[in-house]
Amino acid sequence: MSLRNVAISSFSTAVLAGGAFSVSHSQQAAPSGAAIFDARCKACHEPPIARAPTREQLRSLANETIVEALTSGVMQPQGSGMTPAERGAVAAFITGQAVAAGPAPARGAGPGAGRGPATPPPPPPPTSVEPATPAATTLLARVRGVTNAMLHAPAPGDWLQWGRTYDGQNFSPLRAINRDNVKSLVPAWRAPLVAGPSMPSPIVHDGVMFLQTNPDMVLALDATNGTLLWRHVYASSVPSSQKMGLSLSGNRVFVPTSDLHVIALDARTGAQVWDHQIALSPPATNRADFQLRSAPLIVGDKVIQGVTGSGAPGGGYIVGLDMATGRELWRFHTIPRPGEPGDNSWNGLSLDKRSGASVWDQGTYDKDLNLVFFGAGQTYDTGPLTHRSTDPSVNNDSLYTDSTLALNPETGRLVWHYQHLANDQWDLDWVFERQLVTMNVAGRSRKVVMTMGKMAILDALDARTGAYLFSIDAGTQNVITSIDPRTGAKAIDPSKVPDPNRPTLICPHVSGARAWPATSYSAGTGLLYVPITEWCSTYSAAGSKLMSAPGSGLSNADHPDAVKDGKMGRVQAMDLAGHRLGWNTDIAAPMSTSVLATAGGVVFAGDVFPELVALDDRTGAQLWRASLDANPSSNIVSYSVGGVQYVAVVVGMTNNDVNDLSRRYQAFRRGRGETVDRLTGAPSVVVFKLGDQTGGNSAR
């Protein structure tokens, strides 16, 4: 077995505890803190780059939070190689509070921690990769291999893919929890995770929950109580990155890694089966420019993995791997190569000057059409594309950015594409899930692929041909003034094009009215349920630079609707048949999880207050709420074991989206004179089931 991939026999309890420090006001800050900050941190925070807090915002954090971020969180790359004393010195320099070295309890551990009952400390690591108890052995032995038939029609109690099913509808057919009894939900169990950057979504099969989390760790848990069955840690050559999940097929678990590998594990033991390193495509030479964020998509005997390459020359791509060996079988580049169709859409730029078109989300699959559907993101190097070249043979549409791509899963051949927004100058891309539905359009049944970008505009396309069908605008953006009803082409407000001489308010914020947390579709109601955040950015010559176009400096701005009602979140229903908005429920805090609709008539959603709420799928009326002690940031999933239905969400992990949302919401509340509590709950999987209570419940 490769030493890079070890099914854990021992794992440092100190790492599991997050390596926190206790705070003392009596000890002076280490004298090296200022120098280390200048060398490692200042470039990102003074002035702040996009998504990074200012120095003043950092000052309001606790020392433990900064140390954790440098140790295993979003600032881990900057903290790489620092000693514990140096991380403590940086924290003390930033906050002005001295740090006393020495391990403290894990976040949320100990009496009175968090905003409610103490979070239990992490369990000791297993002594062997083998199941620790006879009961675990029995449970794992019952786990059946996942067949193609199961992937196409999963058992109602299973959640086998990132969006549960090949169509990505993110809908649960379970109905034991319903509108009438959801108020009786209570915490069922909670399992601790290692703090760090991730947005993992659980997969559940035959009573076992599989979860990928920090640091490049895969867990198999008893889905009824959270008992650890096995743990596998991949020894990545780079710091752990933000990833969304894993996939199942046969008796294997397929896992993307932080250093551009895909590995296959035995689902019953966690032992490695194979390891494939994804090669770079010329002209790219730096592996650090690329990441694997999404769960692989399993189609037949192919493992299909999207690759992000936001700033890499040549951009992102999608690879098809052989399920049995990991060998690469095909590759599709999301930026056309010289001589390929679309090569002339980059304003005359050579391939080494083109970047972006990253693939962030898992694709979806239609068996009858034999097509897989993926989205590609924008480019950050917008300067050379701002104005169209005078050469009539080229344009600046920049394919295949902001596009839906329909590929043959056997060969990777592009069958059709549709570009939702040409020449995206705002990082308001259309990269998220592609959901498949069958519905009546203009009097006949059509297979439809639909997707929604950061502007919360839904585009619906014919899944067979890519022909445009209709759009629905959630009404939170101010960039698009109109949409052509025949082609879907978007007309841009010229005052919103970045201009260094004209500051302008752009809504939504660069992080999106919606981001990677998925929408949910219910065929029973015909409604699509969308998690929305109302926030904006000011574009000007000042501010942090995310895109390269002049005038695209970014600073935070409040959304007029949020200013009006004091609420930044919204769950929005969209009536697909009527091509119009349905009900909406305003939520105080930004939405940070997927929305999950169920056959029981309940819609679940999570926010950074933080809370988990349940709404009536017909009206949006709130039916239940549970306070959380850490921000939720995953897809919400529902599954059943032994006739008991569960609802699960991951809390306390860090990633770009939840960090942005939390910081902005805290600033929004402070601006309104509200008090903001500091969250101290530990990263965990939190699971609910029906109990005997009749009111709101706390998971704190």
Image (cartoon, rainbow, N blue to C red):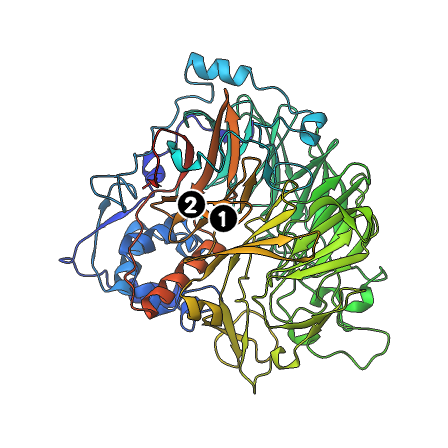
* First reached walking from the N terminus: tag 1 or tag 2: 1
Q: In which quadrant will I find the N terminus? A: top right
Q: Amino acid at mark 1?
A: Thr
Camera-near label (1 vs 2) is: 2
Between 101 and 484, the one lying in front of the other is: 484
Which mark identifies residue 593? 1
Position of 681 compared to 162: left or right? left
Q: CA distance from mark 1 to mark 2?
A: 9 Å
| Residue at (79% x, 68% y) in the render | 345
The x and y percentages for residue 24 are 17, 54
Between 241 and 160, the one lying in front of the other is: 160
The x and y percentages for residue 121 are 30, 34
The x and y percentages for residue 477 are 58, 68
Label 2, secondary structure: give it. Answer: strand
Question: Of all residues shown, which one is farthest toward the bottom?
Answer: 501
Label 1, secondary structure: give it. Answer: loop
The x and y percentages for residue 680 are 30, 48
Residue 641's place in the image compared with 39, above or below, is above
Q: In which quadrant will I find the C terminus? A: top left
Q: Is residue 609 visible?
A: yes
Q: Tell whether label 2 touches label 1 (CB within 8 Å).
A: yes
Crowd rating for badge 2 (residues with CA inside 10 Å; few <14, some 14–19, many 20+): many
Position of 543 compared to 171: left or right? left
Which residue, given by chain and number where applicable, does mark 2 sit on? 612
Between 516 and 462, the one lying in front of the other is: 462
Residue 411's place in the image compared with 155, above or below, is below
Between 633 and 436, the one lying in front of the other is: 436
| Residue at (27% x, 47% y) in the render | 115
Which mark identifies residue 210? none
| Residue at (80% x, 47% y) in the render | 446
